[in-house]
Amino acid sequence: MFPLTERHTIIAWNAGIGNKRGSSVVRTRLFAGGCMSKITINAQPRWPDVNDDYAVQFEGHSIGRVRLEGTGWLWSIAIPMALPQWAEGTAASRDEGFKALAAAWGRLLAQTDPARLQRAWELEKAFEVRQQKVAVIKSDEAQP
């Protein structure tokens, strides 16, 4: 774990345009202990042709969501572990929501023991495997 010495800054944000289901990318610079490292957060619409609800991933892991709620945007980090209150919030625009989520994710990475985060990823993987098994059982039961 390392203390952050400066705030996170967003380098780039590429939003999908129109009805294209392109990947959106947020790049965040983290300044820690005199070293600079970059993290990349990817976001895609949760459904085709819906541009107000995004699933957010980091290194292939689902980490959260940014979605329109009324006139504002809700953002939240959602991984299988206890999270602090600052791991969710609201923003005036979609882009501000992505920036806020990226900053909170960088903060969480800086404050979380890598072994604890690895356990969360293992739990995520176990859940995915279980969901696949349940889907197979349901499809087997549906066949005559």
Image (cartoon, helix red, strand yellow):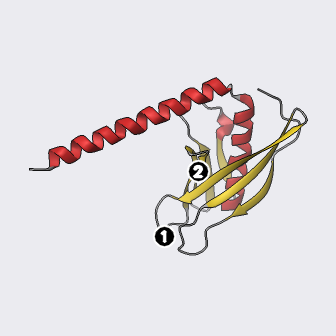
Where does label 1 land, which residue? 49
Q: Earlier in the sequence, mark 2 or mark 1?
A: 1
Is 109 above or below relative to 65? above
Viewer can see residue 93: no
Q: Where is residue 69, by image quadrant?
A: bottom right
Mark-to-mark CA distance, 2 and 1: 17 Å
Quarter of the figure that contains the N terminus: top right
Q: Residue furthest right?
A: 34
Q: Is residue 102 left or right of residue 53?
A: right
Q: Secondary structure at mark 2?
A: strand
Image spot of residue 137 (x, y percent): 23, 40
Image spot of residue 85 (x, y percent): 65, 35
Pick whichever, 69 or 127, lies toward us: 127
Question: At 26% across and 43% down in the image, what residue appears?
Answer: 136
Where does label 2 land, which residue? 56
Image spot of residue 67 (x, y percent): 57, 56
Q: Amino acid at mark 1?
A: Asp
Q: Are marks 2 and 1 in contact (CB under 8 Å)?
A: no
Viewer can see residue 18: yes
